[in-house]
Every structure is written in C-alpha cells, then in structure tokens.
Image (tube, helix red, strand yellow):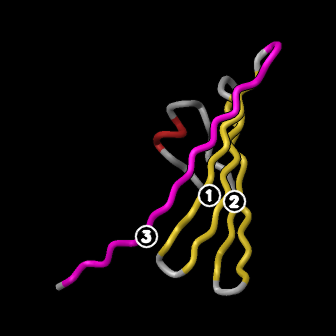
C-alpha cells in the first residue's frame, strides 16, 4: 500500500501499487483517487539505491481539465561510521 501525508491532505486514499521486476530494476505504478481532487497516476523505477518517478495529477472540471506532472529523482544516503 502507498500512503502519503501530503496526498492525504488532498483527499487521496492509500492504494495498492503494481510492481514488476526486470533487468535488476523494480517498476511500479498506482492510481490514487480523490473525490474532490481527481486522480494521481504514480509510476517509476527503482534500481539499486536510486529512484525515478513521475506523478501525473489530473483534475477535471465542467469544460476543461488541469494536468500537472511532478518528477522525482533521488537516492538513498548511506551513513558513514
């Protein structure tokens, strides 16, 4: 299950993500839904300690829709003793 405090404030509920493993990478995808704020398509890939993801937030109105894309890239920070 994916859950985020940030997403919760917009009414998005936790959802199960689909994931597949291929060529030493984990690909994931999930669609979060909010009654008032549309849908949030989350997809990305994890390889070793690096993550790349795109979240596409779509909000539909009577005569138009707004679509915003958010891109994320990061990696795990390892502690040095």
Indicate whether 1 appears above or below 64: below
Residue wearing tag 1: 1
SS class, disc 2: loop
SS class, disc 1: loop
Q: Is residue 78 magenta?
A: yes
Tag 1 near tag 2, CB within 8 Å: yes
User: Where in the figure is residue 38, as x and y percent of width and height?
Assistant: 71, 30
Label 3 or label 2, whichever comes before in sequence order: 2
The one of 25 and 14 positioned closer to us in this rendering: 25
Crowd band around label 1 with a 10 angstrom C-alpha radius: few (<14), some (14–19), many (20+) = few
- Number of marks: 3
Residue at 56% x, 51% y is 71
Query: Disc 3 or disc 2, which is closer to the eye?
Result: 3
Work out which quarter of the rendered image holds the C terminus and state it: bottom left
Q: Give the residue furthest to the right.
A: 63
Tag 3 near tag 2, CB within 8 Å: no
Query: Disc 1 or disc 2, which is closer to the eye?
Result: 2
Q: Left or right? Give the position of 66 relative to 2.
A: right
Q: Give the residue furthest to the left.
A: 81
Residue wearing tag 2: 17
Q: Quadrant of residue 65?
A: top right
The region drawn magenta spans 62-80
Could you tell me how far apart the alpha carbons at marks 1 and 3 are, in whole angstroms?
Answer: 21 Å
Crowd band around label 3 with a 10 angstrom C-alpha radius: few (<14), some (14–19), many (20+) = few
User: Where in the figure is residue 6, as x and y percent of width and height?
Assistant: 47, 40
Residue wearing tag 3: 75
Label 1 or label 3, whichever comes before in sequence order: 1
Residue at 74% x, 64% y is 18
Could you tell me how far apart the alpha carbons at marks 1 and 2 are, in whole angstroms?
Answer: 6 Å
Could you tell me how far apart the alpha carbons at marks 3 and 2 are, in whole angstroms?
Answer: 20 Å
């Amino acid at each position: 299950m994916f859950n985020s405090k940030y997403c919760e404030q917009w009414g998005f509920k936790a959802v199960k993500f689909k994931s597949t493993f291929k060529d030493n990478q984990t690909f994931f995808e999930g669609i979060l839904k909010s009654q008032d704020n549309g849908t949030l398509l989350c997809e990305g890939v994890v390889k070793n300690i690096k993550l790349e993801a795109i979240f596409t937030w779509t909000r539909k109105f009577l005569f138009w829709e707004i679509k915003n894309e958010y891109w994320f890239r990061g990696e795990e920070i390892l502690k040095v003793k």
